[in-house]
Structure formats: C-alpha cells, structure tokens
Image (spheres, coloured by chain):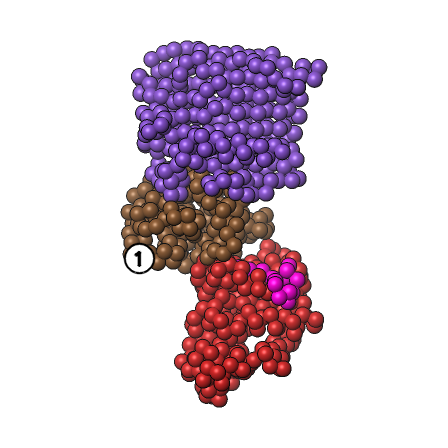
Amino acid sequence: MTTALTGVRATARLVARDDGRGGTALPVLESDGPLALRRTRGSGAEARVMLVGAMSGPLGGDHFTVRAEVQEGARLHVGSAAATIALPGQTKGEAHYDVRLAVSEEAELHWLPEQLISAGGSDLYVTTRVDLADTSRFVLREEQVLGRVGEEPGRLSSRLVLRIAGRTVLDQELTCGPGAPGGWDGPAVLAGHRAVGQLLLARPEFAEHPVAARQLAEHAVVVPLAGPAALVSAVSPDALRLRRVLDEALAVLSA
Amino acid sequence: MSRAALLVLADGRFPAGGHAHSGGAEAAVGAGRITDAESLEAFCRGRLHTAGLVSAALAAAAVLGVPPRELDAAADARTPSPALRLAARKLGRQLTRAARATWPSAELDALAREFPKGAHQPVVLGLAARAAGLEAVDAAYCAVYESVSGPASATVRLLSLDPFDATAVLARLAPELDRVADQAVEAARNVADEGTDALPAASAPLLEIAAELHAAWPVRLFAS
Amino acid sequence: MHLDHHHNGPAAVSADAHRKDGSHRALRIGLGGPVGSGKTATVAALCRALRDELSLAVVTNDIYTREDAEFLLREAVLPPERITAVETGACPHTAIRDDISANLEAVEDLEDEVGPLDLILVESGGDNLTATFSKGLVDAQIFVIDVAGGDDIPRKGGPGVTTADLLIVNKTDLAPYVGSDLARMAADAKAQRAELPVVLQSLRSETGVADTAAWVRSQLAAWTAA
C-alpha cells in the first residue's frame, strides 16, 4: 500500500488452485492496506474467501485493485463482509476500484460481494474485467446503490467486461449521479430507481442450451448473452428489494 | 464527396425499416414513463448518451475501415437484450438492402454475403455512409439523430403528442447531439490502436429490461 | 442491361423476378383495402381454394402485430411456417408502399425456408382508400372493399379503387340489409377502372372466392409464361 497526497493505492491478490486432494488451496492470499482477504470455512471442494474492508473507502484519489485467479480445476467463492461505500476524499479527485478475475479450464468462481454504495459527493470508477476459459463456471453479482438513505448519490461509473476464451461476450458501462451524461435518472435509464444490479452467469452448457429470456420481477429480466453466458438485469427502488430479486434469480438459475 | 448524401441517408423516409421501431418508446409509454414532451425529452436524452453514443461510435468506426465482423461482435457484447440484438440485425438487414440499391458498393455486397440475416444496424450505417462517400462524423450524426428521432416520431403516434412539441424536443437536444457525435468519432479513432475495447459501452438498464418485456407483449404497434 | 450479379451474389436488392438459380421466383399478389372489408377472410378462402394445386405462403401486415396472422393460423388455412407477420409501427401503408424492406425480407425468407413457392399473398393492414402496394414489392394487387362500407366508394375512386389489378366488392350478401345499390357500385367501378376487372363476391355464397381464385390462376399463368 502506498499513501500519497493523491490517495491510497492498494492491490489485493488471490490465487486458488486444485490441491490435488479434492479441495482448493490458496497459495496466494495477499491483503493490502484497506483490502483485507480472509479465508473462511469452505464446503467440499470449494474454498471461501471474505473480502474485509479494514478501512472505509474508497475515498477520492484512492486506487484499489483486487486480482483473483482461479486455476484449472479449482473452486472459489468470494464474498465481502459489508457493503463498500464510496466517499468523497480530501483530495477531491476521482477514486478507482478495479477488479480483475481470471478463471481457467474446469475452474469455478462465485464472486458475490455486498453492495457498492455511492455516497453523496463521491466520484468512483469501478471496472470489473473477467476472463474465462471455455469450460469455466462463473457467477458474479454486482449491485450499485445510489446514495445512502435519503441522500443524493455521488458520481459512479462502472464497467463490466466478460471475455470467454478471449472473445468479449459482455461490455457494459453505466454512469450515474451528478456530472453523469444527461438522462441517467430519466425514463430510458433508471427512472428514479436508486438500486441497480446484475447477476452474470457463465457455464459451458449455455452454449448448447442458452437460458430463455424472461421477466423475473417488475423491472428485472434474465437474458441469454451472445455467448455461453446469461445476464440478470434489475433496477429497484432500494438495495433490499434489489437483493431479494437477485437472490431469487440466483436460486432459480442455480436449480 | 457530396455532403447532401448525408441528408439522403438521415432522412426519416429513407426506406430502411425504421418506421416500424420505436426505440423503446412504446415500452416506456406503456409503463407510464413517457407521458408528455418533457418526459419524452428525458427519455431521448438518456437514450442519446447510451445507445446513441454506442451506435454512433460503431458507425464512425465502420466508416474508418474497422472490419465489420469485429464491430458486429462489439455491438453484440454491448447489447445484452436478445430482443434488441434481433431488432438491430433486422434493421441492419433492411438498411443493407436500401443502401446497396442507393449506393452500390463491393463492400456492401460483401457485407450482405457475410451477414445474410443482417449485421447490427450501426455497422451497416457506417458502411452505407462510406459507400455514399461520407465521413465518420457524418455517420455518427446519422446514428445520434436516429437514436432520438425514432422515439420522438413514435411517441407522436402513440400519445397523439403535438408534433410541434416533439420536434422542439429534438431541436433542444441538438447541442447534445453535436457533443455525442464528436465523442463517438474520437472513440472510433482510437479503435485502430486499441481495438474495439476503445468503443464506448454506455448502457441503459431500463431500455434493455423494457425491450425484453415489450417483445413479450401480445399486442403492440412497433417491432421494438 | 441484365443485372446478372444477382444470381451469384447476395440476396437481390429489389423485386428481381428471378431466384438466384435463374428460375422464376414466386408471384407476389398484394391485397389491400379498408379495415373490415374482408381481406383476411379472402386470403383464407384463397388459401383453401388454391393450396392443393399450388405451393403458397402468406405475409400479413398488421396494425396490431400478428393479429391477422394469428387468425389465419387458427383457421389452419396453411401450415404455420407458411405464414409470416410483418410489424408495421402504426403505419401499415408505409410498410407496403414507402418502405417495403421488411416485406421484401419476409417474402424472401419464405421462399428460402419453405420454397420453392408458386404464389405469395401479401396482405396489407386495414388502411385508407389511398393505400396501394409498391411495384417493388408485388407483381399484382387486389383492392378489397365491401358493400357495407358505403355504396359510394367506387364512385369516390382513389388509387386503390382505380388502379388495383383486381377490385373486389365484397359481402354482396349484405347489400339488401345495408341499403347498398350493387348495380350502381358495379357501374361506378366500371367507370373508374375502364378495362380493369371487378369481382362482386360473397364468401358465404356457393361460388365464394371462385372468381377471385380464377383471376389469381390467370395471373400466375401469365407470370409463369413471361
């Protein structure tokens, strides 16, 4: 971790590999400053890791990176202990939060962090890049909450890119809050909803049997992407209702 | 080049199928999110900065010579809704037909062979502009204008909105159309060095979600 | 000049009369006319009359998408893969005249998927008296009016009544009940249309759609011979 006038730079690293005895080992589990990684009790072949925010953040000027690599045959589940809150910093600059996930052949990653809350006055760029192999299995949840209760949101820009075997299957960017391009809160984009979320699933069997597009809740659908992956998109008035929709979707799609 | 070719291509009467699509306006009207000129303007502004920007950058990149196959894949990745992917390909196929008849070109013939069921419409739009001797910025202007003129004219039909009010909405958006067209061309110019990842990917959750719900309506006026 | 690049190249850009292999494509006949005049019923009757002797398909253009197509499906006049609905965005006349691209794709897809076909009927959504088909889309067109719509329609004329290759005055069985003067309608139509044919039709009568079917057969014979 380095601290400068420009803010905190921190990179947490995580590597999971098949331990050869039917389980998953974590040869690399590197916390850094505000990004702390803790191994928790897993189940079966799966290792579990919790991302624990040792400090609140990211603040303006901070640049956080989390890198996770799941090697051939390994199974990893990553959650977080609490919501991440983007806050304004003393330096007034923008903050960056980059997540880089790589999943190899026959490996599985469940990346299910808690919400990202964009507090008033914050300015955060989140980028999540996922690289999968043809036979990887993958689940990712992403939830953005615009403002704490009763608060105007900060500026939040998030980009989510999924590549499978080198081919980009999803590239999606959403920018909200003061200073975002016009219309972000209007009838085409969020229409006043304060929570927006996605569930991204990739499985080799989706190549032959893609999910059927269908409605899951008033403002939630599941769709097959142009590749062996599915996306649940939802907007909700608040974080609680959003989570309920995404939990139900995950249960249905995992069944 | 003839700049007037831009008027031919951008004309709402250019016979490329656009009249049957509302750009999400029918779904938004049905859900009560567009009710008048003010909410139409907010809708168009949101569509302009998301789907409009992405389309304009794809079209501009096609004019600049980025291979259609790569741009079509980039468009797929930027369009999670299968209903919208289908609509974009239908419109792309119709535009391919109209453009080949209007500005015969080997590139458009090759596109029709490579994508018999249609490439994404903005990609075709770029190649049509290229065949017409137009520049990247012209194609970007066509795309950003289509992104707002389609919903505006559909809303006139759906809500019996005063057509003068709808046209005034488009006029008020004009300075933003300028900015988004420039932004799109700038991004498109970066594709040569950085690949299609340099293209914007701005999305509008409700456009995507509502497109799927609309596709399942048993009775509707517009195809999308 | 013969534009033979169509035969080796990608799909034709306009109403080319030949398939890629050089053979004659299907004859395309459009059916237009006001709402409720009996276009869909006439299409259904034509399908029943001709389906055993010809390979045929139907494209519908609905105001509310798919309604007419679904009527034809329910009536089972043709297998479902031979019926396609084009969505028209609240402007059925645009889709058959000003911007025919969606309809051209529908007819081409039908030929590709269930062809070769002898005949494709393209039914317009119910519209006004000025709605006619583009010559880029169909080879011949039928305009369907009915006696209940007012016996002054033939006199009023309009592009559909005056220029259609066949004018059908439909529901003649209702004439006594709605006070329409059939003789006058026939005379007015003759005056507007000179040598162009007019069929007075009641689908409930014994002859039913026979006169119209005979006209379609003669069109097809001329098309095949050309």
Q: Residue at x 40, y 19 (%)?
A: A58
Q: Is residue B191 visible?
A: no
- According to the picture, the residue beneath numbered tag 1 turns out to be B162
Residue range corresponding to the magenta coloring: C73-86
Tell me the shade of chain B: brown
Q: Residue at x 35, y 27 (%)?
A: A149
Callout 1: chain: B
Task: Tell me the kind of residue under disc 1.
Answer: Asp
For label 1, the SS is: loop
Q: Give percent across and percent down for residue C159.
A: 44, 75
Could you say which is closer to the camera, residue C107 or residue B157?
Answer: B157
Disc 1 residue crowd, few under 14, some 14–19, many 20+, Cα 10 Å: few
How many numbered marks have been drawn onto this rendered protein structure? 1
Q: Give percent across and percent down for residue C76.
A: 64, 65
Tell me the shade of chain C: red
Q: Is residue A230 visible?
A: yes
Specify the chain shown as purple. A
